[in-house]
């Protein structure tokens, strides 16, 4: 700036005269590269007030064709969202908050992405990502923040163009406090503003359905171990990846809302829906049914079978197929059904939790051998080696009497599960973390307290740290789980030194720092030799080593709200 401020008249127009104070004022107030100088008045920001309506959101959704399905879902759930906001406000003090400027850019929904996810939403295409985007947008708006929605490259440029050159226009563009996007969107943003994206690196929150593990995220490891793929090598903090389900504590669990009994004025009619002797099969694509005829035949011995597939060519003739129908109609079918039947695919969708919320048991197919990016086309290229042992691992953890694990090739096992289901009565079950209020609580805490731009951490507080040693061959995720806790990667730096470990009775006779493994800090029990992690991007809760004892940072969590510790709210 000292050398180049005369190259463009806009610098002098904003008060730059070559002196260091004028340069610092420009770089802190016109652009935001530097902290504001002491004594300078920072414009006050308006408070975040929990909103009583979503109507102010609809115009920005209505004019974006790519967000049409999202717009419909949010409208259908407005009453529930508003009531959840009131309920959360009554329980917690939400008044002392500042309204954030938040850019929301679902890159995979843009025409430029070539995925066709947005247009396929009404013809049986995958809805998981759109469900999550819908619920995130509604949550941020109800919480009182200023949303800037982008669903195309031109819209993205219009928001960010003030930052693409060294000198912004006279009326500077809004500077985002947070940017929610996905991996496709991150690539698009990098392309639009070039190296300037680094300025925003720590405020990105990246929606990542399956999660990202440290070796796939680290550019050097990607190159060294040939882990190249379309979603890896991003070099971000792992907690910036926001997942659909709490797969791995290395990432942040964002989640979504389970749609059920949406409108209170319809609830009585909904509750009066009579339970029929029927099963509803989870499979919108007729191709999902292929090879499952014997399995569905067993179910048909006990129940009438209904489906919502895109065509009838590949499904048994006795199935009553309703075709692709709206979410509200699926809720009615679930209320009428006794069993929601998994076919093994699709993996980890929202629908099984919707079934449980409508007191409809779920048949969850086992997957043996487990699927991962090492052996499955579904996970191929995904930045994780997590193994999936059933169609729905989160539901698997819920267990009976709501979720019944079955080998779909074992008719006796399917018989046994169906007999048990038909001889039981269950109440609706909805984990708090998948309710509107639960998502409002979780996202509000993340927005207010998850600061990934500074070294000072407030989420979770250090008082929540509980140290557990994991025996050789055991990951920190499993070691913490065995103690009724969850691994918390934000605490790894607090254990990553001889001095800190001594506080927890770990006696390191010798020690070294290394970036050669994902399990550090750890030690060899025989020699008391400790190895510490030299690269903070390689801390991991989910990996283990047969010869090393891991030192694990654990914390407690709120029941049915695993993303938050008890002291986090």
Image: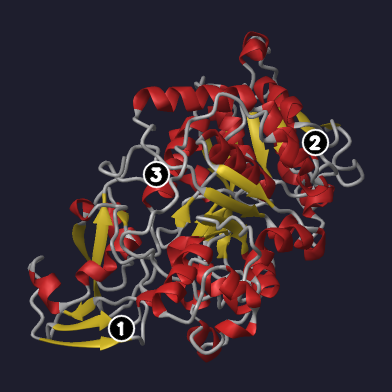
Report if the CB atoms under discs 3 and 2 are less than 8 Å apart.
no
Residue found 20% across the figure and 79% down from its top: 523
Q: Nearer the viewer, residue 542 or 452?
A: 452
**C-alpha gap between disc 2 and disc 1:** 52 Å
Q: Earlier in the sequence, mark 2 or mark 1?
A: 2
**Residue 511's image quarter?**
bottom left
Q: Quadrant of the C terminus?
A: top left
**C-alpha gap between disc 3 and disc 1:** 30 Å
Which disc is residue 308 wearing?
Answer: 2
Q: Is residue 417 visible?
A: yes
Which disc is residue 534 wearing?
Answer: 1
State left or right for residue 34 relative to residue 301.
left
Q: How far across and down, in percent of the image, does residue 456 sit?
A: 28, 62
- Mark nearer the viewer, 2 or 1: 1
- Mark nearer the viewer, 3 or 2: 3
Q: How far across and down, in percent of the image, does residue 356 sit?
A: 56, 31
Q: Earlier in the sequence, mark 3 or mark 1?
A: 3
Q: How far across and down, in percent of the image, does residue 220 sit?
A: 49, 87
**Residue 260's image quarter?**
top right
Bin the neighbour count of mark 1 within 10 Å (Cα to Cα): few under 14, some 14-19, many 20 and up.
Answer: some
State left or right for residue 114 relative to residue 270.
right
**Residue 158's image quarter?**
bottom right
Q: Earlier in the sequence, mark 3 or mark 2?
A: 2
């Amino acid at each position: 700036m000292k050398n180049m401020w005369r190259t463009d008249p806009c610098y002098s127009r904003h008060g730059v005269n070559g002196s260091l104070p004028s340069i610092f004022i420009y770089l802190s107030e016109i652009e935001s590269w530097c902290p504001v100088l002491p004594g300078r008045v920072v414009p006050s920001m308006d408070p975040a007030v929990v909103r009583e309506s979503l109507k102010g959101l609809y115009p920005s959704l209505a004019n974006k064709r790519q967000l049409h399905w999202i717009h419909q879902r949010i409208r259908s759930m407005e009453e529930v969202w508003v009531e959840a906001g009131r309920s959360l406000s009554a329980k917690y003090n939400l008044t002392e908050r500042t309204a954030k400027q938040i850019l929301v850019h679902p890159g995979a929904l843009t025409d430029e992405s070539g995925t066709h996810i947005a247009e396929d939403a009404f013809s049986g295409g995958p809805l998981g990502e759109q469900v999550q985007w819908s619920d995130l947008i509604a949550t941020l708006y109800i919480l009182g923040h200023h949303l800037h929605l982008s669903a195309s490259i031109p819209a993205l440029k219009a928001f960010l163009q003030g930052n693409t050159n060294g000198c912004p226009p006279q009326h500077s563009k809004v500077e985002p406090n947070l940017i929610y996007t996905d991996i496709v969107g991150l690539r698009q943003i990098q392309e639009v503003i070039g190296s300037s994206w680094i300025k925003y690196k720590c405020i990105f929150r990246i929606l990542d359905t399956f999660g990202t593990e440290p070796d796939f995220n680290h550019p050097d490891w990607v190159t060294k171990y040939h882990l190249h793929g379309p979603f890896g090598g991003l070099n971000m903090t792992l907690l910036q990846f926001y997942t659909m389900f709490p797969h791995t504590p290395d990432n942040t669990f964002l989640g979504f809302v389970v749609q059920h009994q949406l409108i209170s004025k319809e609830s009585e009619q909904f509750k009066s829906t009579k339970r029929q002797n029927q099963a509803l099969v989870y499979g919108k694509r007729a191709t999902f049914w292929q090879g499952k005829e014997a399995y569905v035949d067993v179910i048909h011995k006990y129940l009438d079978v209904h489906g919502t597939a895109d065509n009838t060519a590949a499904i048994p003739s006795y199935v009553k197929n309703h075709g692709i129908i709206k979410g509200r109609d699926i809720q009615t079918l679930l209320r009428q059904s006794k069993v929601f039947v998994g076919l093994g695919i699709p993996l980890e969708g929202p629908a099984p939790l919707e079934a449980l919320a409508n007191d409809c048991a779920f048949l969850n197919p086992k997957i043996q051998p487990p699927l991962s990016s090492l052996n499955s086309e579904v996970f191929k290229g995904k930045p994780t080696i997590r193994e999936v042992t059933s169609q729905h691992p989160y539901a698997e953890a819920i267990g009976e009497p709501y979720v019944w694990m079955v080998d779909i090739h074992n008719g006796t096992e399917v018989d046994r599960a169906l007999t048990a289901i038909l001889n039981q009565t269950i109440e609706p079950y909805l984990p708090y973390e998948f309710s509107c209020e639960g998502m409002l609580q979780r996202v509000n805490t993340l927005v207010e307290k998850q600061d990934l731009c500074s070294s000072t951490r407030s989420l979770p507080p250090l008082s929540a740290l509980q140290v557990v040693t994991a025996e050789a061959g055991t990951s920190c995720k499993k070691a913490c789980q065995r103690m009724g806790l969850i691994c918390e990667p934000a605490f790894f730096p607090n254990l990553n030194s001889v001095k800190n470990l001594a506080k927890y009775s770990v006696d390191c006779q010798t020690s070294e720092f290394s970036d050669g493994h994902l399990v550090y800090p750890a030690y060899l029990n025989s020699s008391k030799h400790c190895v510490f992690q030299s690269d903070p991007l390689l801390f991991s809760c989910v990996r283990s080593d047969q010869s090393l004892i891991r030192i694990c940072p654990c914390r407690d969590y709120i029941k049915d709200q695993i993303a938050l510790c008890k002291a986090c709210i």
